Amino acid sequence: MPAAACRLALPVALALTPLSALAQPAVPVSGMVQQLPAEKPVHAAWTCLLKKYVKPGPDGVNRVDYAAFQANAKDRATLDTYIESFADMDLSGTDAATFAAWANLYNAVTVRYILEQYPTGSIRDGYLFGGPWKKIKVAAGGETVSLDEIEHGILRPRFGNPLVHYAINCAAVSCPNLQPEAWQADTLDEKLAAAARAYVNDPRGVTVTSRGLTVSSIYDWFESDFGGSKQAVIEHLLAYAEPVLAEDIRSNPRIRAYDYDWSLNDTKKAETE
C-alpha cells in the first residue's frame, strides 16, 4: 500500500458484499462463530489508515495524528468510502466477522467525527452532560444507526462479551487503545485478549494504591458486563493481569475509586505534555 494515500484494496462492489457471502461459519470461539479470513479485504482500507495515523506512545497510549489525517483529502475520501461500504452490508449475524465489522465501523465513524470537529480537546467538547454518541449516525446494515445504538443496542446485547469494551474506541486518552489495524474475524479472540491485557496492565485500567484499587470508570459504567459486582470486576482484572499486578491486586482486592480522562487521544496533545 503506498505511503502517500490509502486506497480501497478492492472495488466498492466487493466491499459491499454481505459478510455471509464472503465466508462460512467454522468453529465457535468465545461465544462467537469464527469465519474464514475471506472477509479481510473488506477492512484493508481501514487497516491502511490506522497504520498510517495511529501512533503508539511510550506511555502505552495509542494516539491519532488527527492533524495530518485531516490535511490529507485523499485519505479522508477513503475513510468516507470505507464507511459507506457498510450501508447495505449484512450485519445481522452473531459471528466474529459481524462483531469485527460493527467494531470497525464504530471506530471509523468516531475518527471521522473527530476529523470534522478538529481541532478539539475532547469528543465531549460542547456537551455539559454526556456526549455526541446519540447524534452521530451512519447508514449500516440497511438502516441508520447512531454510535450509541451500535454500542448499547447491538454490540453489547447481541454478543454478550465484556471484551467489546476493548474493541471500540471513544477517542479519549483513558479509552482502551485504538488498534493500529482493523479487527478481523480470524484473529479476533487473540487480538481482543491482547487488547484486554494491555489495558488492564496499564495505569488507565488499574492503579494499585495503599488504600486499594483505582480502576477505569469503564468498570463502573459497565459493571454488569463484567459480572455485575465489584468482586466480578476484580476477577476479570485478575484474568488479564500480569503476575506482579495480579499479586498486588490480591494483596488489597478492594476497588476504592474510579478514574477517566476524556482528553482527546491526539498526538499533538502528547507533544505538548
Image: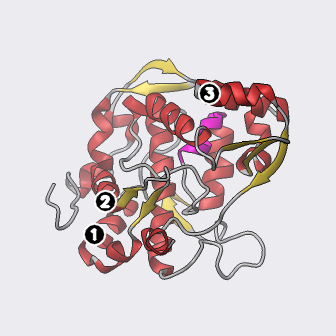
Q: Position of residue 61 (x, y in %)?
A: 50, 54
Q: Is residue 7 above or below residue 168?
A: below
| Residue range corresponding to the magenta coloring | 159-167
- Please give the label number shown on residue 9: none
**Mark 1 to mark 3: distance in Å?**
42 Å
* Residue 50 x %, y %: 35, 56
Front disc: 1 or 3: 3
The amino acid beneath tag 3 is: Val
| Residue 156, image x, y percentages | 66, 42
**Kind of residue at disc 1:** Asp
Q: Nearer the viewer, residue 57 or 21?
A: 57
Residue 178 or residue 189, whichever sits in front? 178
Task: Specify whether residue 61 is in view.
Answer: yes
- In the displayed structure, 97 sits above or below 153; it is above
Residue annotated with mark 3: 244
Which residue is situated farthest in the left direction here? Answer: 2
Image quadrant where residue 22 sits: top left
**Total number of numbered discs in the rendering:** 3
Q: Helix or strand or loop: what does disc 3 sit on?
A: helix
Report if the CB atoms under discs 2 and 1 are less than 8 Å apart: yes
Residue 91 relative to residue 208: left or right: left
Distance from disc 3 to disc 2, alpha carbons, whole Å, reads 36 Å
Task: Give the residue pinned by disc 1.
Answer: 75
